[in-house]
Image (tube, rainbow, N blue to C red):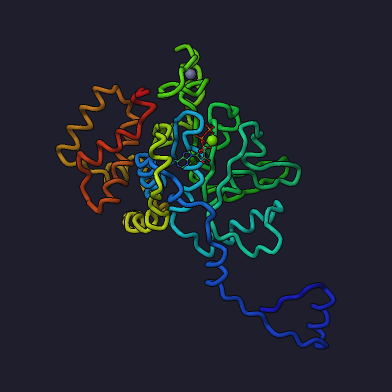
Amino acid sequence: MYGFGNLPELIEFLSGTNNLEPTYIDISSVMKACSLYQDDFADVKGQEHVKRALEVSAAGNHNFLMIGSPGSGKTMLARRLPTILPEISFEEALQTTRIHSAVGLLNHGQPLIATRPFRAPHHTLSDAAMVGGGQYPKPGEVSLAHNGVLFLDELPEFKRNVLEVLRQPLEDGFVTISRALSSITYPASIMLVCAMNPCPCGYLGDAKHQCVCSPSQIHRYRQRVSGPLLDRIDIHVEVPAVPYKDLSNKYCGEPSIDIRNRLRSARQIQIERFKKDNFYSNAKMRSRHIKRHCVLNEDAQKLLEAAMHKLGLSARAYTRILKVGRTIADLGGTQKISAEHISEAIQYRTLDRGAF
Ligand SMILES: Nc1ncnc2c1ncn2[C@@H]1O[C@H](COP(=O)(O)OP(=O)(O)OP(=O)(O)O)[C@@H](O)[C@H]1O
Ligand SMILES: [Mg+2]
Ligand SMILES: [Zn+2]
């Protein structure tokens, strides 16, 4: 490969008046140098329950919702999800770099983006900014997050039409922008992570602050996140504020690399399981895959049935629990889904349980 600083250099080279030496690029060392993350799960004190839920979500590619009061660490946790996803491949890094370069987001002198992107657009953004648009359509936030994480903080504040346009990319992994005479398609394969407060004032269920919201205000606030987008989120968890004794603890949490290594075999099991399908994660299973791959043992079946009746769970929640149960069993390296796996998956349906 040859590199040229300008056009005259290229012309001189082609006409044989300039003897340039070819350039060699060691892809693996460029990838290594560009694949370091600034953040690490070791920085997060406590929150073991949320970290475990994020691990399950990363293992099966399940979209994720956190519900917690201001300052409980939701943004901090979400930022660290890319650090436990599988290492980005060279092809993925090229795609990501190309998209960022198209909108001028590549830093000067940066050859490659080899970390999984994390995009956190503000809730005031327009639908065009979310999926791409303009006279000469540019990629939007969902494509800038391709191969990585799209984080929607304060989910209930996003406009409905902005959430609506996320349906295609969440379903298909790409987004099509239509114009009068043509249409353009950008890749948009993302993990969606959302965060919200438990109520409009933010402090419902908080040990230290009094919530000042009325039941109807709380109901209206929750209603704003119902519908098609919520249907595509398999895991919802509460994020309680961390007690001072945990924050002041000098011990670090488990580093991201250890968590990521633990996920490797669960990912491999899924690649093998879906090798004849055109997807590779439990989150993408449809009913026929669920029927085939989510076989429960007798205890698990009884537990799920009892939970459905007791908690009044919907058929939709039932499917989500089976998929997440499959991922938890994969993390444990077992073929059959047991009662223990199902009981953990039920805990990840906070909004269905009306638990807070
Ligand atoms: N578990 C934790 N370990 C270490 N630091 C923490 C933890 N939780 C919160 N913090 C500290 O508190 C700050 C605020 O956390 P963060 O911004 O993630 O909260 P949030 O839940 O997103 O709040 P908001 O609802 O206001 O957006 C973090 O930058 C971090 O310094
Ligand atoms: Mg935040
Ligand atoms: Zn409140």
Residue lying at 37% horizontally and 29% vertically, measured from the top left: 350
User: Residue at 53% of width from left, 60% of height from top?
Assistant: 36
Horizontal relation, residue 342 to residue 133: left or right:
left
- How far across and how far down the image is residue 312, in percent? 29, 22
| Quarter of the image where the C terminus is located | top left
- Comparing 234 with 347, the one in front is 347
Left or right position of 287 against 1: left
Who's the residue at 22% across and 40% down the image? Answer: 340
Res. 268 image quadrant? bottom left
The residue lying toward the viewer, choosing from 230 and 344, is 344
From the viewer's side, name the closer residue of 310 and 180: 310
Query: Which x, y percent locates residue 152?
Result: 54, 36
Task: Say whether residue 161 is visible.
Answer: yes
Count of marks overlaid on the render: 0
Quadrant of the rendered image containing residue 22: bottom right
Q: Is residue 340 left or right of residue 313?
A: left
The vertical placement of 150 against 350, above or below, is below
Q: Position of residue 9 (x, y in %)?
A: 81, 78
Residue 276 appears in the picture as rendered: no
Query: Where does the image place residue 68, in percent across and percent down from the top left?
Result: 45, 30
Position of the N terminus by quadrant: bottom right
In the rendered view, tell whether residue 79 sits above or below residue 127: below
Seen as rendered, the residue at the extreme left is 298
